[in-house]
Image (spheres, rainbow, N blue to C red):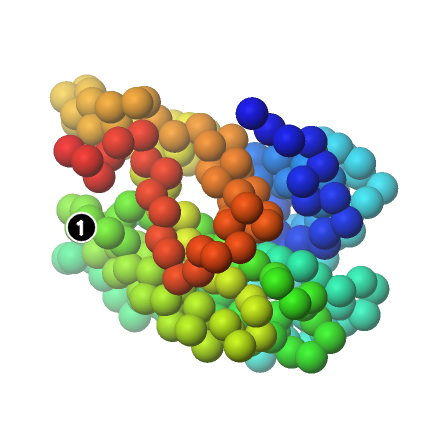
Amino acid sequence: MSVAGRLQGRRILVTGASADSAIGLGICRELAQEGASLVLMGRRQEPLEQTRADIAGPERHTVEVMDLADLDAIATRMKAIAAAGVLHGMVHSASFQGYSPLSRINAEQFDRYFHVNVAAPLMLAKGLRQKGVCEEGGSIVLIGSVAGLRGQKARSLYAASKAALVSLTQSLALELADKSIRVNCLAPAVVQGPKADEQFQLLAEAQRQALLQAHPLGLVRPVDIAKAATFLLGSDSAWITGATLPVDGGYLAG
């Protein structure tokens, strides 16, 4: 049962916060409902403004338009964000995903997957550790995938980048412990929303049914990820760091 206001007074940065991202929007809705003030980050102004208008307390939230491909600019932007109010945590929901059959992989694809899924959260963590940016007791939540814990055919690049995120979570947790900043990762399976609909359209009927049956509790809802992120951002998880928590409807149990 949700406890209203458990993130009251906390300022949280959320990347991938655009309204057309099922996971990002779901996380923003839940965090705002729990009283957090959000910094909504993404590449496009209009979808971010749509998110702000859609969630509780729109006047509490700010919009930050930034392309995380500009890695060297991230730390400076984090300093500027904190100048308007110290942060208490961050959720990195931005992600690049898709299929990458081995026969079609090229250098550009490799860079795109690892840039957003690995390099960007690394530089965001670097920015958050700067003096005056994050309050003591802060929390970082990275959105990974079950693909990082179990291989998936034709998704080598995506799976490898999410596996790297698991390792990054552990290393950052150790490095940031002396600053009392916790780092954890969530690993969803297939999440309900437009991207899942597109994925299912690419599959034959037998493949669609097999994928559905691989989720004993059903496909993951955005709110399921959002509630897990809320837990990891809050004080109830104060002694949890370096962990990767599957939110997968039983996918990895099969």
Question: Which image quadrant is residue 51 in?
Answer: top right
Determine the residue positioned at 42% across, 73% down: 174
Determine the residue positioned at 58% across, 74% down: 179
Quadrant assignment, res 162: bottom left
Quadrant showing the C terminus: top left
- Secondary structure found at label 1: loop
Asked if residue 39 lies left or right of residue 93, the reply is right
Left or right: 85 with respect to 67?
Answer: right
Along the line of sight, which residue is nearer the eye, 100 or 235? 235
Q: Is residue 95 above or below residue 202?
A: below
At label 1, counting other C-alpha atoms closer than 10 Å, the crowd grade (few under 14, some 14-19, many 20 or more) is some
Say above or below: 54 vs 132.
above
Q: Is residue 78 above or below residue 233?
A: below
Residue 67, given in percent of the width and then of the height, sits at 59, 63
Viewer-side residue, 209 vs 128 = 128
Kind of residue sitting beneath label 1? Gly
- What residue is at 46 percent from the left and 32 percent from the top? 224
Residue depicted at 59% across the width and 50% down the height? 235
**Residue 191, percent from left and from top:** 39, 33
- The picture places residue 184, in percent across and down from the top left corner, at 44, 57
The quadrant of the image that shows the N terminus is top right
Residue 29 visible (yes or no): no
Q: Is residue 206 left or right of residue 4?
A: left
Query: Measured along the vertical axis of the image, is residue 221 above or below residue 148?
Result: above
Residue 195 visible in the snapshot: yes
Horizontal and vertical percent position of residue 117: 41, 60
Q: Quadrant of residue 106?
A: bottom left
Along the viewing direction, whichever of 103 and 3 lies nearer the viewer:
3
Residue annotated with mark 1? 151
